Image (cartoon, helix red, strand yellow):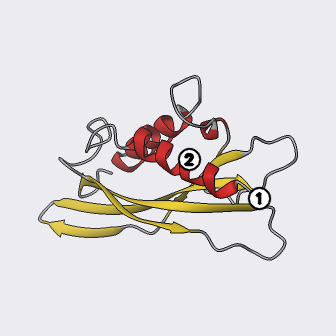
Amino acid sequence: MSSRSDALTVLVSRLEDITVAGGFNTDAGLKLFIGEQPVLGPSDPEASIAVVVRPDEAGYQGENIVITLPVEIQAIVKSSAGAWITIEQVIADIKTAVEEDHDLGGTLLRRGLVRGTTRALDREPGSEFVGAGVEYRLVYGERWGQP
């Protein structure tokens, strides 16, 4: 495993814990989309989560590399009259689950979990879901040639 995959594994694990039985507002953690376009069918839950990994940025310090990996965690909700209430509940669940600590269980540099903006997702014409995304920046280190 690499530092990057370790951090993403912890992040996804925390998101999978989002269930009403686990003390959260929603069961959005029961359906995760990772690195793929969300598509919801009639039998899928009302709310789900998509994890979108953006291009990373590397900074060098000798043999050590400090990497910032932007990740957007998206609340995906079937379109309905009360969808925005559910979206806000999923956003709250995401923040609660992810922000357990500031280093994703030691996989990031000290205080390496940084929350960015929360935004409404653009809705494609004819789309049957709406959503919002919370951006996080995961800051971790690697040694040259040792990911």
Residue 142 in the image: above or below residue 96: below
Q: Label 2 is placed on what type of residue?
A: Val
Query: Most extreme residue toward the left, as rendered?
Result: 62
**10 Å neighbourhood of mark 2: few (<14), some, or many (≥20)?**
many
Q: Is residue 69 left or right of residue 41?
A: left
- Please tell me in which quadrant of the rendered image residue 16 appears: top right
Where residue 128 appears, x then y in whole percent?
81, 62
Query: Most extreme residue toward the right, as rendered?
Result: 42
Tag 1's secondary structure?
A: loop
Gap between marks 1 and 2, in whole Å?
14 Å
Task: Work out whether residue 33 can be spotted.
Answer: no
Identify the residue at image location x=39%, y=67%.
Answer: 56
Residue 95 in the image: above or below residue 65: above
Where residue 123 appears, x then y in whole percent?
70, 72
- The mark found on residue 90 in the picture is 2
The residue labelled by disc 1 is 79
Q: Label 1 is placed on what type of residue?
A: Ser
Where residue 70 appears, x then y in whole percent?
40, 63
Query: Most extreme residue toward the top, as rendered?
Result: 21
Where residue 19 appears, x then y in whole percent?
58, 31
Tag 2's secondary structure?
A: helix
- Please tell me in which quadrant of the rendered image residue 105 appears: top left
Q: Is residue 49 left or right of residue 141?
A: right
